[in-house]
Image (tube, rainbow, N blue to C red):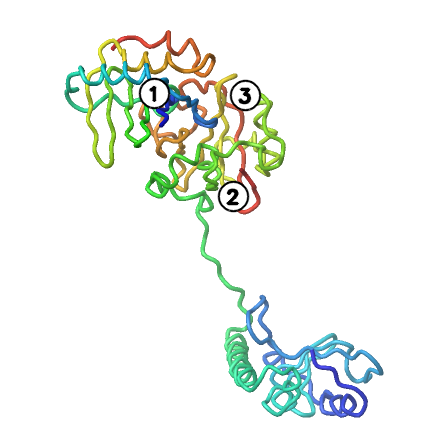
Amino acid sequence: MTWTGTVLLFSGRPDPTWAVPPSIVRSLQRIWDRAAAYPGPPPAASPLGYRGCLLKSPDLREWLAYGGAVTLRTAGEAESRRDPGRSFERTLLASAPPRAVPASLIEALEPP
Amino acid sequence: MIELEGSEAREAAERLVPVRPLARSEAVLPPWPTLGYRGLVIEQVAAPDKRLPRVFRLVHGDLLGPRLAHRAEDEQFETFALGMSGLVRRLGYGPEFSRRLEREVERFRKLRADLAKRRHRAPVWPKRHRCACAPLYEPHWWNVSQRQPFNNCYNYATNYRTDTFAQPGLAAGAMYAALTCAAVRPAAIADALIDSPGANNRCPDEGHLVALVIAPGWDFHWYRKGRNGYWSHKPGGTPVTNVDNSGAAIPDPRLANRGPYVNFCTFMTVMHGHIKIR
């Protein structure tokens, strides 16, 4: 039962995807469980360039982290919560294998 | 094909002897190719009758060929040949084939009569608009779960769904080896896209215009010009959109906010049906 991470980055090439270790998944679940609801619609990324990162569970639930919000998408439903300091987003990106995600990208993630 | 030999061939030649030149209004055939019955093509293979050319056509009792536009001696030869008890029976297609042929002969007769009334006027084609060959902007077709995640900017720009996240040059065994204009452009050319650096944002006469941009060492991206003259794109597995990174419409991709795709490489032309991508 593999959890996968994906950084939404490219247009022509496939986005980098990797298996997320169980310890990281537990950390991310803790962040999610403690997070407060996000007021209003979550921030939307520009079409080109970095567009956030995605955690996908074996039962096909998806958490999209971008710009200080995390959105859980299940069949036909979505729930957004705050991601102060982008901790969910940073933790997930940091779990990528070396060179899968450009270091400059992680460094450039400014807290909202 | 039905072959006639010996006395049978000689009898046919006698029945097809030209007897009267056709008037200009009678010797009418469609000036463009048509579907369905178009007459009997008769070829003299051996011992040709000198009164007839080697190859000619018989249609509704008219003989048409090189220096030949005459009425045949036996105007009913065609009916005889195609009827249920005629020569066509030898093909073994059954009586329904003959009945269908009879209807076809009459359909073609009516077409010729209509053409004669119209005095060979060439068809008038509707006026074409600029970018009429460009694909429609139809984001709803692409932005569905069966297609959106599996098709990228290259698929969308070329209007060619592969569900494989197509890569320039892969289908031709000439995939790019670096993420530069100099590497991706020839890869796309290997897929049969036509480099059009001088297009200057103008629609081609045929096919549609696409544009290649590069985030150096990072990625490539494609736009396509739509029927309305504006550009749209599909960033990776995300939805198709017609706005740039500033949320503005895209009249010219050279001037659009392209995020990290800072190098504008070239315009290229996609000839529909010519390209092959994977």
Residue type at mark 3 is: Leu
Q: Which residue occupies 50% across, 28% down?
A: B212
Residue type at mark 2 is: Gly
Q: Is residue B109 left or right of residue B129?
A: right
- Same subunit, tags 2 and 1: no
Image coordinates for residue B62, horizontal then vertical, percent: 64, 83
- From this view, report whether residue B133 is shown above or below residue B61: above
| Mark carried by residue A53 | 1
The answer to whether residue B257 is visible is no
Residue corresponding to mark 3: B179
Q: Secondary structure at mark 2?
A: loop
Give me the C-alpha separation between circle 3 and circle 1.
23 Å
- State which chain disc 1 sits on: A
Q: Residue furthest right?
A: B47
In the image, which is nearer the foreground, mark 2 or mark 1? Answer: 1
**Quadrant of the snapshot with the N terminus of chain A:** top left
Q: Secondary structure at mark 3?
A: loop
Image coordinates for residue B152, horizontal then vertical, percent: 44, 33
Image coordinates for residue A87, horizontal then vertical, percent: 27, 11
Residue type at mark 1 is: Cys
| Mark carried by residue B207 | 2
Give me the C-alpha separation between circle 2 and circle 3.
26 Å
The quadrant holding residue B139 is: top left
